[in-house]
Amino acid sequence: MTGERVLNFDIPLFIKWAGGKTQLLRDISKYLPDDFRGYYEPFVGGGAVSFFIHQNFNPKKIVLSDINEELINTYKVIKNNVQELIRLLKIHKQNDSKEYFYKIRGLDKPVSYVKGLSDVERAARMIYLNKTCFNGLYRVNSRGLFNVPYGRYKNPGIFDENNLFKVSKLLSNVTLKTSSYDYILNEIKNCDFIYLDPPYYPLNGNSFTSYTKNDFGKKEHIRLARFCKQLNQQGVKFLLSNSHTPEVLELYSDFNINTVMARRAINCNGNDRGEIREVLITNY
């Protein structure tokens, strides 16, 4: 739906994220509206779609949000203090080892975490753990503590300095919020566009939803479907990604449902990685 627009698919990314959309950008681009003034993405994750939108559509307003506090803090630090972040990441890279990993992972115990780490230190820790942990998975337990073990990498690419500067530049005029998606109904206009990429409806017991201490389960998906219907009533265009399940097809039966094939490279169970069917749902 992007007409004759020449699209740039070279997207700067700074973090691995389960369900990341880099390899689906060409499919997603086919279903983007041709014109919109503002862009909202409330499940921003690794940011592939938001950076793609920024580079190719240059909306007047971009609002990115996520309920994951550590993730949004990292975005804010890259935006506002990228040079200090790079300095700390160099220290992590120099000291990387299994023992060092568990030392840094253990910093999120409540007392030392809240009182002892600055925003920049938290962001550097987030990126370091993400790039060196098993399968590049961000997962927390019921207490909100990161609990993924050390990965098996000979030479992990912890950061790319030039890439971080590119991301910082892209974020310079972006509004970042630690929030669920509820706030959007009060500020989004019918000339805006929203992309929703929630934790997917579970396919089985191994499906991953633990990005925060509060899992995103079936009740949350029902609530999200109601939210999309409210967007539609307000005349707002939306695009939503989700798993191809009977439940999802039923929840969004009033809208346009398109099937795409995706290859999942990150999963808590390596045997569950591979090509699967997903859906791209629009109301236009």
Image (tube, helix red, strand yellow):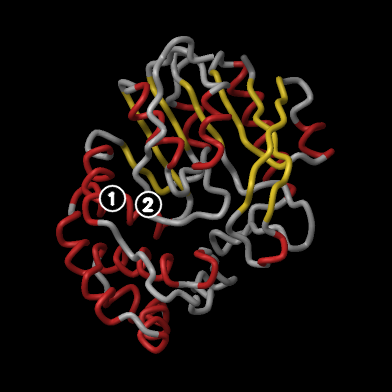
79 with respect to 243 (left or right) = left
Q: Are marks 2 and 1 in contact (CB under 8 Å)?
A: yes
Give the SS element for disc 2: helix
Depth check, front residue: 65 or 91: 91
| Residue 107 image point, x, y percent | 37, 79
Q: What number is the disc on residue 76?
A: 1
Image quadrant occupied by the C terminus: top right
The image shows residue 230 at horizontal and vertical percentages of: 62, 24
Cα separation, mark 2 vs mark 1, equals 6 Å
* Residue 59 percent across, percent down from the top left: 34, 22
The disc labelled 2 sits on which kind of residue? Ile
- Image vertical order of residue 178 relative to residue 61, above or below: below
37 w.r.t. 48: above or below: above
Give the residue at x 73% y 63%: 206
Q: Residues within 10 Å of mark 2 (few under 14, many from 20)?
A: many
Q: Quadrant of residue 240?
A: top right
Residue drawn where x is 34% and y is 65% of the image: 158
Q: Nearer the viewer, residue 171 or 6?
A: 6
